[in-house]
Image (cartoon, rainbow, N blue to C red):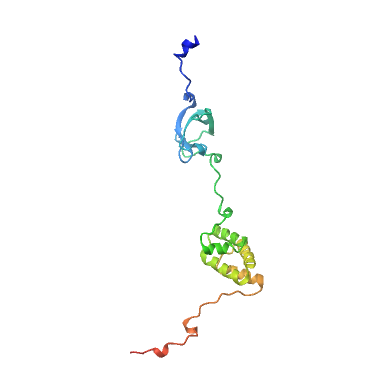
Amino acid sequence: MLGEERDRLHRLPAIAHTVCFGETRKVSWQSTISVGGALYSVPSTFVDERVWARVDGGELVVVHADSADGPREVARHALTTPGRPSIDEAHYPPRPAGALERKPRAASADEEAFLAIGPGAEAWLIAAAAAGASRVRRKLAEAVDLAKLHGAGQVDEGLRAAADAGRFADGDLAAILAHHGGEVIAFPTRASEQQSLQRSTRSWEGFGG
């Protein structure tokens, strides 16, 4: 009889009958689905895939059935209303590290020379970026010049102290080095035309007039 029935029987479908799973929804790029005008999160691995959603008591149950492993529940939320999305942070990958946890990467020769001063320089750059310090490039060049004059170790300690104290203004590093070293550090300034040692051209005034 089995041989006779085999000609009339058909194979079971590869995908289970899904009416009992509820209504189908496509997972958005934000890893959410909309049910009754309210948003519910779904694991980010299912973005652009089809899922089924049904109400079970006071909860929304989300099932994924398009896989060789068969249907399985992938999310469950307490029912909510439009404008109050139900988001489960576990459905999303870890967020990028904050500004204070990022490791700076040199994008120019000047930045590479600054970071070569030591870990204090790296700490200063991270803290300065988090604090929104201005004219950072000029301060990097100043620190590199100071390292050439007074040694990378001393400047590295000064940068670490500046980062810890949140001092990122112009001249702060030089002031810290002066305090630690007991000497005043000053960069040479360009002389004005009135103070120049070059001979005056006043004698040429009126020439050819």
Q: How many marks?
A: 0
Above or below, 208 relative to 104: below
Residue at the farthest front position: 3
Asked if one can make out residue 204 in the rendered structure from this viewpoint, the answer is yes
Residue at the farthest top position: 1
Instruction: Give the percent coordinates (x, y) of residue 49.
Output: 46, 35
Quarter of the figure with residue 24: top left
Instruction: Give the percent coordinates (x, y) of residue 89.
Output: 55, 41
Q: Is residue 112 left or right of residue 26?
A: right
Q: As rendered, which of 103 and 54 lies closer to the eye?
A: 103
Above or below, 78 relative to 134: above
Instruction: Give the percent coordinates (x, y) of residue 38.
Output: 47, 36
Quarter of the figure with residue 25: top left
Q: Where is the C terminus found, in terms of image quarters?
A: bottom left
Q: As rendered, which of 178 and 39 lies closer to the eye?
A: 178
Residue at the farthest left position: 209
Above or below, 10 relative to 99: above
Q: As rendered, which of 197 and 136 lies closer to the eye?
A: 197
Q: Residue at x 41, y 90 (%)?
A: 203
Q: As rendered, which of 19 and 120 lies closer to the eye?
A: 120
Instruction: Give the percent coordinates (x, y) of residue 90.
Output: 56, 40
Asked if one can make out residue 41 in the rendered structure from this viewpoint, the answer is no
